[in-house]
Image (cartoon, helix red, strand yellow):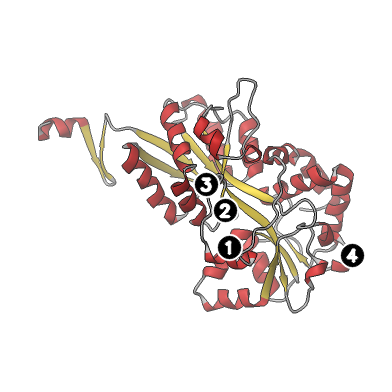
């Protein structure tokens, strides 16, 4: 190709040269971890397919997909919560797909239920535990090593937790409802509210910091927020980690609640094959290690065991018992859970 014809076929943009014949997929991502960039360029190197990333949070991505409708340029979507993935499925934002690679790699409890034609609307790609962090000088482990005990009167005035209707909590509460049934779950939520040390505010990291600061004794958080503090070099973060301990609840019963981050093919993609190829790539062992580790998560794919010092320290290097319920059942409970939250005044 002569320089002249190259220039007519390609447009020079700041990110490099994009040619009309280049394959580009549009990725709407709620993941904003710098390490993910290297991962995506790995995909481009192996397949020649470029990734054009649009960043937002889960809610922003879903609102955008709805607004764009059938004109949406989105090909692949990455979200960071099971209830949100379920919501995207129900709202028809995803294209259910068949992929032997994905079906072999991702355990069936970590992906959506297949439709009648066998198509699967979304796949979990990494997992995070919803754990309990506590002030080790003030609380004994036996008093908080189950989710049930967080609502027990013995823990009155000790609990810090973010808003009840945040997706991470909706997913946890939806899971609790699978395990305990509706009535017991509502009573449990009521117990949580009466054990609050303060009105819910802030994110998960804020709850951990509130324990270290003595504002409360017990907090609920996703595991990677604690891992992030454990890996931080900042003296103030080290001081927080020094004061707290962590427990993976319900080891003697149904196991610790696991949420997922996951991916889906966009309903109106014009590049179904390439979109599936990208999700398949993310489920490969190399990508899984990188993808999960970048945010201190565990891989969703079978047989991938990354070495992450913070996660190892958190679990004492031992395997822990995690929930085995289908993660899709969690999302299905969120409407009922939200109604319960309104009734018990958990805002
Ligand atoms: Fe998060």
Q: First in sequence: mark 4 or mark 1?
A: 4
Does 297 appear above or below 136? Answer: above
Q: Judging from the image, what secondary structure is the residue with disc 3 in?
A: loop
Q: Earlier in the sequence, mark 2 or mark 4?
A: 4
Q: Earlier in the sequence, mark 4 or mark 3?
A: 3
Q: Is residue 115 left or right of residue 189?
A: left
Disc 1 from disc 3: Cα separation:
22 Å
User: Which element is circle 2 on?
Assistant: strand
Q: How far is mark 1 from mark 2, CA to CA?
A: 9 Å
What residue did someone put label 3 on? 30
Quadrant of the rendered image containing residue 202: bottom right
Is residue 156 among the parts visible in the rendering?
Answer: no
- Residue at image location 52% in from the left, 69% down from the top: 231
Instruction: Tell me the distance, in whole angstroms, between the alpha carbons under discs 4 and 3.
Output: 38 Å
CB atoms at circles 1 and 3 under 8 Å apart? no
Sequence-wise, which precedes: disc 1 or disc 2?
2
Neighbour tally class for label 1: few under 14, some 14-19, many 20 plus, Cα within 10 Å: many
Residue placed under numbered mark 4 in the picture: 153
Q: Residues within 10 Å of mark 3 (few under 14, many from 20)?
A: many
Residue 130, x across and y down, in percent: 68, 56
- The alpha-carbon separation of the residues under discs 2 and 4 comes to 34 Å
Instruction: Point out the tag, 1 or 3, that comes first from the N-terminus.
Output: 3
In percent of width and height, residue 345 lies at: 83, 52
List the residue tagged with mark 2: 298
Of labels 2 and 4, the one closer to you: 2
Q: Write down the residue under mark 1.
A: 311
Tag 4 and tag 3, C-beta contact below 8 Å: no
Closer mark to the observer between disc 1 and disc 3:
1
């Amino acid at each position: 190709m002569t320089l002249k014809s190259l220039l007519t076929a390609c447009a020079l943009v700041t990110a490099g040269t994009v040619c009309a014949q280049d394959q580009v997929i549009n990725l709407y991502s709620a993941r904003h971890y710098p390490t993910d960039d290297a991962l995506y360029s790995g995909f481009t190197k192996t397949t020649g397919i470029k990734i054009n990333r649009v960043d937002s949070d889960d809610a922003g991505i879903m609102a955008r997909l709805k607004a764009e409708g059938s004109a949406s340029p989105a090909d692949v979507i990455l979200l960071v919560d099971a209830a949100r993935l379920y919501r995207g499925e129900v709202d028809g934002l995803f294209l259910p797909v068949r992929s032997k690679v994905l079906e072999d790699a991702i355990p069936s409890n970590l992906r959506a239920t297949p439709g009648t034609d066998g198509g699967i609307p979304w796949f979990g790609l990494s997992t995070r535990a919803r754990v309990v962090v506590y002030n080790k000088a003030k609380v004994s482990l036996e008093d908080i090593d189950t989710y049930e005990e967080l609502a027990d009167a013995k823990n009155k005035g000790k609990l810090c937790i973010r808003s009840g209707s945040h997706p991470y909590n909706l997913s946890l509460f939806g899971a609790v409802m699978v395990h305990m049934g509706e009535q017991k779950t509502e009573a449990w939520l009521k117990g949580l509210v009466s054990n609050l040390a303060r009105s819910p505010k802030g994110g998960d990291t804020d709850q951990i910091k509130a324990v270290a600061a003595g504002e409360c004794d017990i907090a609920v958080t996703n595991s990677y927020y604690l891992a992030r503090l454990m890996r931080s070099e900042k003296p103030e973060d080290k001081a927080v980690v020094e004061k707290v301990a962590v427990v993976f609840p319900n080891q003697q019963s149904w196991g610790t609640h696991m949420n997922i981050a996951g991916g889906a093919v966009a309903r109106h993609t014009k590049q179904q094959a390439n979109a599936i190829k990208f999700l398949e790539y993310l489920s490969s062992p190399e990508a899984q290690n990188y993808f999960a580790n970048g945010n201190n998560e565990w891989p969703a794919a079978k047989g991938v065991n990354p070495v992450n010092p913070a996660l190892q320290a958190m679990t004492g290097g031992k395997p822990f018992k995690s929930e085995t319920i289908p993660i899709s059942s969690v999302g299905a409970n969120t409407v009922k859970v939200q109604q319960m939250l309104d009734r018990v005044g958990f805002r």
